[in-house]
Image: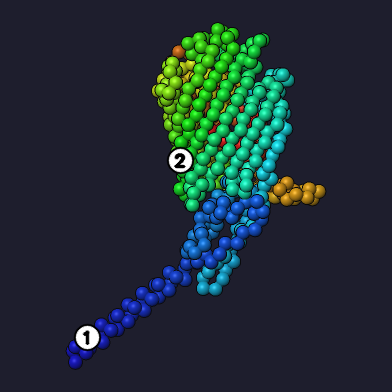
């Protein structure tokens, strides 16, 4: 009798345990969704595999209901960051047995841009407006074929005449292999300059234009391999060749321009780049962060008589955060370390070229090492809006988006130079500025900026920029 009671008790407990486990399993199953299919429309040019590569979820995957919306949002951001689509819509159709279909609707961009070139050749637009040197105008033709063959490939070619002559051709294939994790790039560039920045005096570039021949001819060829295993991390290995040829008068006026009074300098270089980018947008980020580490060796010992072999380590960190409704904060910091502190003038450029401090647009600061950091507090005056232009028939152009932001910002930077020109007082000391401005963000990756800035020396004024923020970094 006692054994029978014990057996009944055990069966009772096992039954309740089995029922409990079954309920738990049913609960977990009920909390999950199965991706039954992915339906895509609007990709008239873009291959389906390119789109599927960027989705966080694939056909046959399961996802918790609470994680569905973040997955859809991240997938949308990944697709927009390809810069292949003006608009991306991702919806969900619920089916029986906790199954769902993804409904993806795309508006593709216009991919072939045979654009006439008519541009200024100064370091930035504000400098050109101040100098108003109309001889510094470039003209020509530029072909940029995005999404070449519908596979997110990029083909570019340029013929530029005028103040700076340039001939270039480059090709990028980002999605090689079964899992689209490998990429290759290759190209060349020939650049003729009638005028060069031969030196830096009183913190400003000194321009020189010889009468008999181009001041400088530069040839550059490169090849690059890229590995992108998932979505946000990318490794790149780049191999380059440079060949500089300057006029005799340039080599005489500044014997350190190419170093040693030489009128020609050629060398190989190799660089490794680690890139981790989890920002919501690469064009105008509001949330997320981005880290880039670049290690490069200038001079590989392949060419004799190159006495300026240099190792450089460059790091970039960007942080973007939403503080409150319509209020955002971002910080961008970049630093460079060079193993060699004394290099020729053409290798000694720091701030004022690609990276610059707001309010310091007329100046350049040369040196081997530098750090630059900027903080920006922005308020979203006009939320992102969409407008359809009725008299334009092509959907690649008739539907535009725009947003407007008010910014308050401060910049700081420091450049290290071992033997600076005594007149260049901005080196080896902290420089800083502050200001406020307006950003107009619109389609095809354009940002129009108007800033009012005051720098450390009390110089102030309005500065204008047309660019994609941080792309130069």
Q: CA distance from mark 1 to mark 2?
A: 65 Å
Q: Is residue 243 left or right of residue 208?
A: left
Q: Residue at x 59, y 44 (%)?
A: 153
Q: Residue at x 52, y 19 (%)?
A: 346
Which residue has dot 1 on it?
6
Q: Residue 186's image quarter?
A: top right
Q: Residue at x 63, y 36 (%)?
A: 156
- Secondary structure under the numbered disc 1 in the rendered image: helix
- Secondary structure under the numbered disc 2 in the rendered image: strand
Which residue has dot 2 on it?
235
Q: Is residue 44 above or below residue 158?
A: below
Q: Is residue 256 above or below residue 385?
A: above
Q: Residue at x 53, y 52 (%)?
A: 53
Choose between 375 and 241: the one closer to the eye.
241
Q: Which quarter of the image is occupied by the N terminus?
A: bottom left
Q: Is residue 405 left or right of residue 184?
A: right
How far across and how far down the image is residue 86, in percent?
66, 48
Q: Is residue 32 above or below residue 146?
A: below
Label 1 neighbour load within 10 Å: few <14, some 14-19, many 20+: few
How far across and how far down the image is residue 14, in percent?
30, 80
How far across and how far down the image is residue 324, in percent?
55, 47
Mark 1 or mark 2, whichever is nearer to me: 2
How far across and how far down the image is residue 421, in percent?
50, 11
Q: Can residue 290 be seen? A: no
């Amino acid at each position: 009798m006692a054994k029978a009671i014990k057996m009944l008790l055990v069966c009772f407990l096992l039954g309740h345990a089995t029922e409990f486990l079954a309920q738990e399993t049913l609960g977990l199953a009920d909390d999950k969704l199965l991706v039954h299919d992915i339906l895509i429309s609007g990709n008239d040019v873009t291959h389906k595999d390119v789109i599927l590569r960027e989705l966080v979820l694939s056909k046959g995957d399961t996802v918790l209901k609470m994680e569905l919306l973040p997955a859809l949002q991240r997938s949308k951001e990944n697709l927009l960051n390809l810069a292949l689509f003006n608009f991306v819509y991702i919806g969900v159709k619920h089916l029986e047995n906790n199954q769902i279909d993804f409904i993806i609707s795309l508006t593709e961009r216009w991919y072939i841009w045979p654009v006439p070139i008519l541009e200024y050749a100064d370091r930035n637009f504000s400098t050109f407006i101040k100098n108003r040197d109309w001889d510094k105008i470039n003209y020509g033709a530029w072909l940029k074929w995005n999404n070449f063959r519908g596979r997110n490939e990029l083909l570019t070619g340029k013929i530029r005449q005028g103040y700076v002559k340039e001939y270039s051709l480059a090709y990028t294939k980002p999605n090689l292999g079964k899992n689209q994790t490998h990429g290759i790039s290759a190209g060349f560039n020939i650049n003729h300059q009638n005028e060069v920045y031969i030196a830096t005096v009183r913190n400003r570039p000194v321009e020189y234009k010889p009468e008999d021949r181009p001041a400088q001819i530069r040839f550059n060829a490169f090849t690059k391999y890229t590995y992108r295993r998932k979505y946000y991390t990318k490794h790149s290995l780049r191999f380059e060749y440079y060949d500089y040829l300057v006029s005799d008068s340039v080599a005489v006026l500044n014997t350190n321009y190419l170093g040693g009074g030489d009128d020609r300098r050629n060398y190989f270089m190799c660089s490794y780049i680690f890139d981790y980018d989890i920002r919501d947008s690469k064009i105008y980020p509001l949330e997320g962060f981005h880290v880039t580490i670049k290690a490069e060796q200038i001079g590989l010992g392949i060419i004799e008589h190159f006495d300026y072999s240099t190792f450089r380590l460059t790091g970039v960190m960007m942080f973007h955060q939403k503080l409150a409704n319509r209020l955002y904060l971002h910080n961008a910091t970049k630093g460079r370390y060079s193993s060699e502190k004394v290099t020729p003038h053409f290798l000694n450029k720091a701030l004022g070229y690609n990276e610059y401090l707001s309010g310091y647009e007329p100046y350049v600061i040369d040196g081997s090492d530098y750090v630059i950091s900027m903080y920006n507090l922005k308020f979203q005056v006009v939320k992102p809006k969409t407008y359809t232009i009725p008299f334009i028939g092509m959907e690649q152009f008739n539907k535009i988006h725009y947003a407007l932001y008010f910014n308050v910002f401060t910049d700081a930077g420091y450049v290290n130079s071992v033997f600076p020109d005594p007149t260049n007082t901005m080196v080896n000391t902290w420089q800083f500025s502050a200001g406020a401005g307006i950003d107009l963000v619109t389609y095809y990756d354009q940002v129009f900026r108007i800033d009012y800035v005051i720098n450390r020396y009390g110089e102030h004024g309005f500065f204008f920029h047309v660019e994609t923020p941080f792309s130069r970094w």
